[in-house]
Image (cartoon, rainbow, N blue to C red):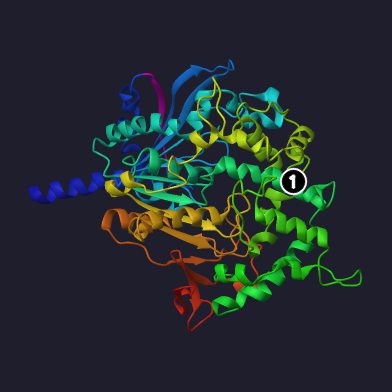
């Protein structure tokens, strides 16, 4: 009877906590304030489950590394740490994109995932930071304010890598104090600039993370920034108003011609070009040039020339490549591609593209040494890019001086980017999954492919033992376009790290809320294959991933 009574009491207590889970860790959450490391100030609050986080969590808001910069601005690393009640011994550092400067919600969110798949909903404690600077600290700089931290050498380093180096041990300490248990597995995840940081971590901090999830990484970001000037100059040759240089009709015609030639190369016409390498060999944009003024299904020579110039990537007067070339793919017609390269919907920017405003400001103030003191208005930023000299100005991404002792290519890129081996990360047992959209207008998928090829060559064909690369046809810089852009790359990484199950193909689907997909793309699934393989139709339903197999081009 006593045993039954005790059991009944235990069940009753459990039901109380299950019905009111927010109260289960309130004391631990409040007590965490007293356990913060020296010179780290934190506030805590217990938060109920919400739309993004499926279980109650302790929200930690913190500030550390306060200092005065050489530009007489206050700097600090601000961060957010979310500690879910449902914890499985996992820790994730969420590397953020863009120019940082704000603390984004620490959810472990990355392209392809739905809410239930966010890291925090898969048993992770997650940390996120502002990268060591405040984007709102430079109102006098106008549209260039988000990049003005580049006037301070330490802020540049924090943005490039050292904010992660400083915050990671603090975050780990708080996680282990809260749960009173050691972290079992540490992960890093990010996309765009955040993907760059993940690759930097693999080289600079090889034992910091067990698994890295890398989305469309800008690991050569200063070089990629040169593309912004290259594009603006190419488009200006067509029209003084770059937004009018290529109409949406032009890009749709270009895409349709590309699909006509390349869609069937993977065995089926479905508006997805999986055989992207074969496509590059046969597609000739010059064939789209109008032969006469009477031709209708064609493009004027100056427009085709602009597109070809943009896809060849920036060069100097000696015809030396300064970044890389780009893939011809269907995402050129996407809203995302247009937002980045031709025109945005942001009225405060006079609807200029992201590459002109954010890209131009970053190139001038962060990646150039000494920084180019370009004013933060649309006219000044556009003129800066139009007058950019690829012989004289481009080398400044490699420059240093007495104040800025690290070049942009030093503080922004993996130290071994040109000759990757990742010896330390590999010896640590680390695993990395990379995914990149073939239609990315910001960071070329070809740069990522070449990096992988260099790694595989250095390791005599053994790169796939700890790194897998997945190319996503039609996907631009993030979700959108004619693409299968819904997929879970995090769970395969967890399985690889924790259970030694190396990933093979990963099933991706079209999103119903993607307005850019065609009618025949609705509801279909496709396998994303590890590079160098691609998905080719075998037999069966055209809607199902199981009807395709991963093959390697001959």
State the image coordinates of residue 87 (x, y, percent, origin top left): 31, 45
- Please report the residue visible at 37 percent of the width from the left and 49 percent of the height from the top: 421
Q: Is residue 172 above or below residue 210?
A: above
**Quick check: can you spot residue 127?**
yes
Whether 43 is among the magenta residues is yes
Q: Write the start and end of the magenta stretch as one range.
A: 39-48
Q: Is residue 44 above or below residue 321?
A: above
In this view of the protein, which residue sits in the foreground, 389 or 2? 389
- Please report the residue visible at 65 percent of the width from the left and 51 percent of the height from the top: 313
Mark 1 Cα shell of 10 Å, populated few (<14), some (14-19), many (≥20):
many
Whether 498 is among the magenta residues is no
Q: Is residue 523 left or right of residue 185?
A: right
State the image coordinates of residue 524 (x, y, percent, origin top left): 54, 72
Q: Is residue 377 above or below residue 300?
A: above
- Please report the residue visible at 36 percent of the width from the left and 60 percent of the height from the top: 464
Quarter holding residue 549: bottom left
- Please report the residue visible at 28 percent of the width from the left and 46 percent of the height from the top: 428
**Quick check: can you spot residue 57?**
no
State the image coordinates of residue 81 (x, y, percent, origin top left): 41, 35
- The residue to which callout 1 is attached is 232
Q: Is residue 297 left or right of residue 102?
A: right
In this view of the protein, which residue sits in the foreground, 75 or 257? 257
In this view of the protein, which residue sits in the foreground, 314 or 434? 314
Q: Is residue 539 above or below residue 90?
A: below
**Magenta stretch secondary structure, dominant:** strand
In what element is the residue under mark 1? Answer: helix
State the image coordinates of residue 224 (x, y, percent, origin top left): 60, 45
In this view of the protein, which residue sits in the foreground, 192 or 406? 406
């Amino acid at each position: 009877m006593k045993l039954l009574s005790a059991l009944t009491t235990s069940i009753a207590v459990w039901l109380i906590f299950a019905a009111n889970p927010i109260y289960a860790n309130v004391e631990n959450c409040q007590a965490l304030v007293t356990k913060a490391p020296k010179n780290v100030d934190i506030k805590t609050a217990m938060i109920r489950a919400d739309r993004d986080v499926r279980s109650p969590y302790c929200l930690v808001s913190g500030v550390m590394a306060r200092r005065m910069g050489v530009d007489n601005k206050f700097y600090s690393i601000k961060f957010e740490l979310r500690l879910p009640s449902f914890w499985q011994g996992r820790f994730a550092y969420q590397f953020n994109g863009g120019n940082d400067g704000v603390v984004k919600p620490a959810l472990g969110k990355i392209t392809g995932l739905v809410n239930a798949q966010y890291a925090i909903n898969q048993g992770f404690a997650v940390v996120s930071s502002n990268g060591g600077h405040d984007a709102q600290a430079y109102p006098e700089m106008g549209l260039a304010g988000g990049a003005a931290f580049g006037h301070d050498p330490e802020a540049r380093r924090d943005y490039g890598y050292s904010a992660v180096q400083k915050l990671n041990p603090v975050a780990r300490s708080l996680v282990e104090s809260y749960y009173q248990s050691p972290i079992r597995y540490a992960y890093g995840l990010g996309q765009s600039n955040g993907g760059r940081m993940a690759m930097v971590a693999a080289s600079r901090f090889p034992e910091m993370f067990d698994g890295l999830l890398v989305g469309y990484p800008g690991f050569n970001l200063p070089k990629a920034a040169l593309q912004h000037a290259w594009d603006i100059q190419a488009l200006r040759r067509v029209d003084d108003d770059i937004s009018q240089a290529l109409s949406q009709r032009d890009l749709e015609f270009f895409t349709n011609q590309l699909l006509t030639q390349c869609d069937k190369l993977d065995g089926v016409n479905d508006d997805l070009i999986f055989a992207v390498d074969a496509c590059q060999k046969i597609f000739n944009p010059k064939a789209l040039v109008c032969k006469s003024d009477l031709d209708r299904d064609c493009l004027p020579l100056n427009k085709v020339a602009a597109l070809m110039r943009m896809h060849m990537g920036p060069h100097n007067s000696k015809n030396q490549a300064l970044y890389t070339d780009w893939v011809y793919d269907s995402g050129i017609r996407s809203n995302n591609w247009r937002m980045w390269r031709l025109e945005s919907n942001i009225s405060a920017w006079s609807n200029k593209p992201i590459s002109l405003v954010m890209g131009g400001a970053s190139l001038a103030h962060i990646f150039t040494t000494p920084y180019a003191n370009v004013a933060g208005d649309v006219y000044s930023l556009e003129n800066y890019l139009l007058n950019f000299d690829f012989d004289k100005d481009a080398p400044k991404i490699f420059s240093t001086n007495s104040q800025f002792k690290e070049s942009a290519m030093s503080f922004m890129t993996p130290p071994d980017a040109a000759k990757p081996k990742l010896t330390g990360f590999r010896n640590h047992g680390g695993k990395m999954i990379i995914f990149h959209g073939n239609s990315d207008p910001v960071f070329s998928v070809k740069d990522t492919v070449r990096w992988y090829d260099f790694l595989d060559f250095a390791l005599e064909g053994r790169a796939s033992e700890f790194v897998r690369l997945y190319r996503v046809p039609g996907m631009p810089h993030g979700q959108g376009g004619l693409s299968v852009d819904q997929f879970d790359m995090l769970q395969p990484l967890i399985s690889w790290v924790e259970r030694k199950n190396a990933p093979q193909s990963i099933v991706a689907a079209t999103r119903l809320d993607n307005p850019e997909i065609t009618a025949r793309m609705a509801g279909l699934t496709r396998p994303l294959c590890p590079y160098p393989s691609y998905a080719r139709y075998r037999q069966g339903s055209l809607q199902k991933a199981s009807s395709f197999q991963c093959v390697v081009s001959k």
